[in-house]
Amino acid sequence: MAIAQLAATTDKTANLQVASDLVARAAADGAALVVLPEYTMSWEPRAEASRIREAAEPLDGPFVASLAGAARANAVTVLAGMTEATADRPANTVVALAPDGTLAGVYRKVHLYDAFGDRESDRLAAAAPEPLVLPVGDLRVGVMTCYDLRFPEMARFLVDAGADVLAVPSTWMAGPGKAAHWEVLARARAIENTSYVLASGQCGRHRTGRSLAVDPSGDVLAELGEEPGVAVVDVSADKVAAVRERNPSLVNRRFAVVPR
């Protein structure tokens, strides 16, 4: 499975080209899944609500169609973030595209980024919790987005739905301590859920980059820097089973996660 990062702008054509190239590179290195960042389709820092509405596309629009072509051409599953045009305000959406190019699933962000001086909820609509968990080989991949990583119940919600890999497309904003938060939280979600974490973040100005893949023990398998790139890591259902046998914290828990 692969983590891939890019520095998206408002130039959708350029973003798609970079994303498609990253998908091809990951597939050539043997990946069955490629996790691209949040807002792969288009991004600008703290864009006005009107700008976001103008950029938003439906699920049958050109962004999804083009990325579906890349998934099909390389016979891989692709996860990527976009701004989805909906009847109300746009949604911060991750699409899952199957190796045949069909839309395998959609996740709309639950926890909007109302923190560190920003208010994503002024521009986008929050979704009700609905788990997106899809099979990739003999593993099951649960999807969440960026700020969701700060909420341990979100990861546990996906694990309860069967996930043993947590994919986290992100645009993790830069700032004091933010890179440390990114790594610590990704590793914590892996450790407490005895699951792989594939955290793919945008790089470039205002963004942290440093995408990382973490194994179910919390060990970092791969980490990117602050430039566009891709890293492919080996994942294994046997590894998940072995870690969960040695560290049965999921079995020993005494609380359930119930969305409100």
Image (cartoon, rainbow, N blue to C red):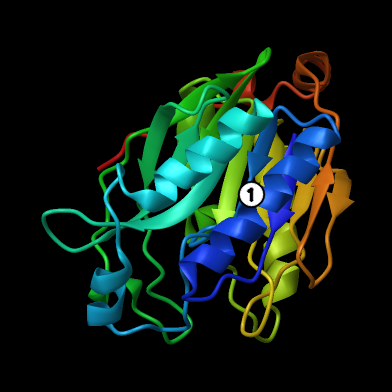
- Judge left or right: residue 182 versus residue 153: right
Quadrant in the rendering for residue 224: bottom right
Residue 8 drawn above or below residue 233: below
> Foreground residue, 245 or 150?
150
Identify the residue shown where x is 18% and y is 53%. 86
Q: Which residue is mark 1?
A: 20
Tell me the kind of residue under disc 1.
Ser
Task: Give coordinates of residue 212: x percent, y percent.
Answer: 77, 53
- Judge left or right: residue 24 versus residue 120: right
Task: Give coordinates of residue 32: x percent, y percent.
Answer: 71, 27
> Foreground residue, 219 or 124?
124
- Judge left or right: residue 216 versus residue 29: left
- Judge left or right: residue 32 versus residue 122: right
> Foreground residue, 177 or 28?
28
Residue 26 drawn above or below residue 199: above
Identify the residue shown where x is 41% and y is 30%. 103
